[in-house]
Image: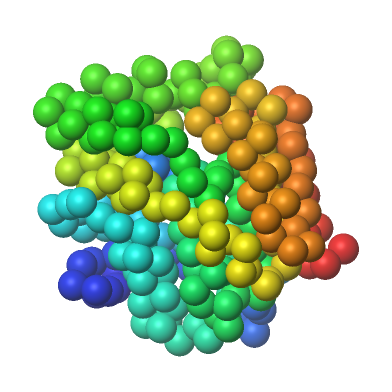
């Protein structure tokens, strides 16, 4: 396990890939998950990239300082970690909250990113009526009280039935997420409205959506892609919110095709 002191907190990260001259790819997790969510992709990605995964502040093995957090902090953590590792420029893939972070990075740090994949996300996710009660419930009751409702939005019923081990692993990660860290990230998402900033992104962008995603419906992904000049959009017919897990093979191939320019 590796840690870096970034912006007065300790961030947990992992690096995969044996080709030390390969380009970098940064992976950013969704709310309530950790670096493990990218397990279906890491081996394939590492054949072409140095793959940097990190636990967003408040998640996994990273510190969970008192919130609320902001999108500026989430963005700054990525840049700080890249600086710590001497990464001048990278590709980026973020899902949900990680995708929101990617919008901010693409708009505010254009010189640091080659290609960006924004997965199951939007430039503005949800409303205060969603996020503030969720943050309060997380702080008061913990994540176990919310887990079943959250997972029902992450995965289709077919995935739950056909991949019980994946479902159990995701649930375990969610219920062990720090309650303050989860709540503080809800507050960061609540205050982040990047719809105008998204229009300034110049890097090549791929936006991914899942047909059955209730958290970030495909129309939001379509709107995001339409706001970014030249962005590509793809919708997976058999996926909900965690499309990288539900249609892992198709997802991996699609992302690699885009990142490798094929």
Quadrant of residue 23 in the image? bottom right
**Extreme residue in the front direction:** 196
Q: Is residue 223 left or right of residue 125?
A: right
Quadrant of residue 241 in the image? top right
Query: Could one spot residue 183 in this view of the protein?
Result: yes
Residue at image coords 49%, 56%: 194
x and y percentages locating residue 87 in the rendered image: 50, 83
Query: Could one spot residue 163 in this view of the protein?
Result: no
The residue lying toward the viewer, choosing from 148 and 193, is 193
x and y percentages locating residue 231 in the rendered image: 75, 58
Using the image, determine if residue 203 lies above or below residue 240: below
**Extreme residue in the right direction:** 262
x and y percentages locating residue 83 in the rendered image: 41, 83
Q: Is residue 211 left or right of residue 3?
A: right
The residue lying toward the viewer, choosing from 184 and 194, is 194
Residue at image coords 12%, 28%: 140
Quarter of the image where the N terminus is located: bottom left
Using the image, determine if residue 261 lies above or below residue 184: below
The residue lying toward the viewer, choosing from 96 and 202, is 202
x and y percentages locating residue 59 in the rendered image: 30, 49
Residue at image coords 13%, 53%: 66
Quadrant of residue 243 in the image? top right
């Amino acid at each position: 396990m590796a840690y870096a002191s970034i912006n007065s907190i300790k961030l947990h990260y992992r690096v995969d890939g044996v080709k030390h001259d390969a380009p970098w790819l940064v992976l950013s997790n969704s709310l309530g998950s950790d670096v493990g969510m990218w397990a279906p992709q890491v081996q394939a990605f590492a054949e072409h990239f140095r793959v940097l995964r990190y636990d967003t502040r408040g998640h996994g093995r990273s510190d969970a300082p008192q919130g609320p957090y902001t999108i500026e902090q989430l963005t700054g953590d990525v840049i700080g970690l890249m600086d710590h590792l001497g990464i001048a420029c990278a590709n980026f893939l973020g899902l949900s909250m990680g995708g929101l972070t990617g919008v901010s990075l693409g708009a505010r740090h254009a010189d640091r990113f080659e290609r960006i994949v924004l997965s199951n996300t939007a430039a503005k996710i949800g409303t205060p009526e969603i996020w503030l009660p969720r943050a309060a419930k997380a702080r008061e009751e913990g994540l176990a009280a919310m887990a079943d409702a959250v997972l029902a939005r992450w995965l289709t019923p077919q995935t739950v039935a056909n991949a019980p081990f994946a479902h159990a692993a995701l649930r375990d990660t969610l219920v062990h997420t720090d309650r303050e860290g989860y709540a503080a990230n809800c507050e960061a998402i609540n205050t982040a409205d990047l719809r105008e900033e998204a229009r300034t992104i110049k890097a090549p962008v791929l936006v991914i959506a899942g047909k059955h995603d209730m958290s970030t419906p495909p129309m939001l992904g379509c709107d995001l892609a339409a706001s970014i000049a030249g962005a590509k959009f793809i919708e997976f017919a058999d996926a909900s919110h965690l499309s990288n897990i539900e249609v892992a093979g198709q997802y991996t191939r699609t992302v690699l095709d885009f990142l490798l320019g094929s």
